[in-house]
Amino acid sequence: QSALTQPRSVSGSPGQSVTISCTGTSSDVGGYNYVSWYQQHPGKAPKLMIYDVSKRPSGVPDRFSGSKSGNTASLTISGLQAEDEADYYCCSYAGSNTYVFGTGTKVTVL
Amino acid sequence: QVQLVQSGAEVKKPGASVKVSCKASGYTFTSYYMHWVRQAPGQGLEWMGIINPSGGSTSYAQKFQGRVTMTRDTSTSTVYMELSSLRSEDTAVYYCASVDTAYWGQGTLVTVSS
């Protein structure tokens, strides 16, 4: 169960869009439509932003969207805002009732 | 409203065990699996395992097999995570998460130091 691969950091100016990739294998990301994304501000618990690849929990702005192609899932933040600056983690089901997180990506709003 | 309230910070010596609790309220305890996730200082999230509060069945990440035990008490809607043979690398904040990970506990800092 190796961690899913995410870019260490991405950045964008307010109003721009950024996309975070999350690369796994056919045993996790590619094998199931159970990818979720979490936002974490410093010192806080993670917050669920996307589940089942592209579904948004109530209360999450529609600026956040998710998708998947093959073994890579992606989170796109459109219309970037200052409060979006945080760490983001993907997580995938990996079979046999196990899960694996991504390495994490720091999003910086310039 | 849904709440997951975890037990307080712990300081343990290497080789000892720690047991962290997570008390759930505001939803049907037995309807949702409970995950345990940890985060070492300055590091990323690490999935540890999951327990089905209904029947008590568990699944653990390979890394923690043999060292972690997750249990539940349905009478108090509480889940427990016990980690044994602690080493310094186990110093981390430990989180519980449920309702399909839409809700998280506040985290419990476990410090392993001689």
Image (cartoon, helix red, strand yellow):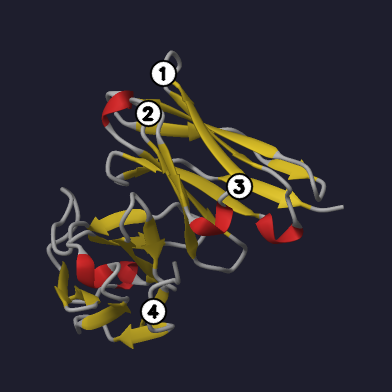
Mark yes or no: residue B72 visible. Answer: yes
**2 and 1 marks on the same chain:** yes
The residue wearing badge 3 is: B66
The residue drawn where x is 67% and y is 47% is B110
Tell me whether circle 2 and circle 1 mark residues in contact (CB < 8 Å).
yes
Query: Secondary structure under badge 4?
Result: loop
Residue A28, given in percent of the width and then of the height, sits at 29, 67
**Callout 3 amino acid:** Gly
When the figure is inspected, residue B67 is found, relative to residue A25, above or below; the finding is above
Q: Judge whether B62 appears above or below A26 on screen.
A: above
Q: Quadrant of residue B7?
A: top right
* Residue identifier under label 2: B53
Answer few, some or many: residues within 10 Å of disc 1's Cα (few below 14, many 20 plus, some between 14 and 19): some
Separation (CA) of disc 2 from disc 4: 31 Å
Q: Residue at x 78, y 44 (%)?
A: B12
Alpha-carbon neighbours of circle 4 within 10 Å: few (<14), some, or many (≥20)? some
**Residue identified by numbered label 4:** A5
CB within 8 Å, label 2 to label 4: no
The residue beneath circle 1 is: B74
Secondary structure category for the residue under label 2: loop
Q: Amino acid at mark 4?
A: Thr
Query: Disc 4 vs disc 1: Cβ atoms closer than 8 Å?
Result: no
- The secondary structure type at the circle numbered 3 is loop
Chain hosting mark 1: B
The quarter of the picture where residue A25 lies is: bottom left
**Left or right: A18, with A90 as reference point:** left
Gap between marks 3 and 1 measured at Cα: 24 Å
Towards the viewer: B20 or B71 = B71
Marks 3 and 4 in Cβ contact (< 8 Å): no
The residue nearer to you, when weighing A66 against B57, is: B57
